[in-house]
Image: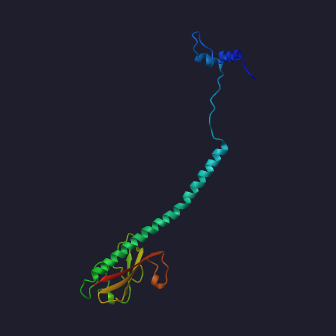
């Protein structure tokens, strides 16, 4: 359907009335148009429920990972402490090689000239890796011990080198030499030149 020029002029006059000077008036436009409230954007109840379900699923997954993370962190701390204990024992054995025959090491009371020793030395350490004094070769683990270090002396391949196998395990109450299975362990092989 085609509109005539007069129809279009009428519509323009009704929708956009002009002032006497020919300018379109904003006030007359607002008077002629019906006011309608602005449409508000909102989420429906279904959308909110779905969003809450997805968020709950994600939070449950994150909370389920927390125990695994804490266990891994604790194992890492224990392994680091056990490695520090191994380093301390190797340093003590290295210093022991310079002592006169018949003397024991100053730090851990290990056997002097340990290459000739056939039985392993057992040492006990606290949670922070500090040596528990007078705990070398005790038959039972002290109550405050967490780590057990077993120093097994091996025959040297040559006269100038002494060998030892150092195993640090935890908890200290479990004896790996008696067939016990520790929660964790770190093992180091030490070759010390005389």
Q: Residue at x 61, y 16 (%)?
A: 28
Q: Where is residue 174 in the image (x, y as percent from the top left)?
A: 47, 79
Q: Where is residue 160 in the image (x, y as percent from the top left)?
A: 29, 87
Indicate whether 134 appears above or below 71. Answer: below
Point out the image quarter for the C terminus: bottom left
Q: Where is residue 68 in the image (x, y as percent from the top left)?
A: 52, 64
Q: Examine the image and state in which quarter residue 16 appears.
A: top right
Nearest the eye: 93 or 148: 93
Nearest the eye: 17 or 92: 17
Number of numbered callouts drawn: 0
Q: Examine the image and state in which quarter residue 146 appears.
A: bottom left
Going by the image, does 23 lie left or right of 145? right
In the displayed orientation, state which residue is furthest to the top.
20
Q: Which residue is drawn at 46% across and 67% down?
A: 74
Q: Which residue is drawn at 28% across and 82% down?
A: 96
**Residue 137 visible in rendering:** no
Going by the image, does 149 lie left or right of 4? left
Q: Examine the image and state in which quarter residue 172 appears.
A: bottom left
In the displayed orientation, state which residue is furthest to the left.
100
Q: Where is residue 58 in the image (x, y as percent from the top left)?
A: 58, 54
Nearest the eye: 1 or 149: 1
Specify the color scheme: rainbow
Q: Residue at x 62, y 18 (%)?
A: 29
Point out the image quarter for the N terminus: top right
**Residue 8 visible in rendering:** yes
């Amino acid at each position: 359907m085609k509109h005539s020029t007069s129809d279009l002029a009428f519509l323009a006059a009704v929708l956009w009335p002009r002032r006497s000077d020919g300018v379109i008036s904003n006030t007359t436009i607002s008077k002629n148009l019906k006011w309608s409230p602005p449409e508000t954007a909102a989420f429906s109840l279904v959308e909110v429920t779905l969003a809450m379900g997805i968020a709950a699923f994600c939070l449950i997954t994150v909370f389920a990972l927390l125990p695994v993370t804490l266990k891994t962190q604790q194992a890492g701390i224990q392994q680091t402490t056990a490695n520090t204990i191994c380093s301390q024992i190797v340093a003590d054995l290295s210093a022991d090689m310079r002592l006169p025959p018949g003397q024991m090491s100053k730090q851990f009371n290990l056997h002097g000239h340990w290459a000739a020793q056939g039985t392993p030395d057992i040492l006990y350490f606290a949670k922070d890796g500090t040596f528990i004094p007078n705990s070398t070769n005790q038959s039972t683990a002290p109550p405050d011990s967490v780590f057990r270090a077993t120093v097994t002396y091996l025959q040297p391949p040559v006269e100038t080198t002494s060998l030892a196998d150092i195993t640090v395990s935890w908890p200290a109450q479990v004896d790996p030499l008696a067939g016990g299975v520790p929660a964790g362990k770190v093992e180091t092989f030490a070759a010390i030149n005389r």
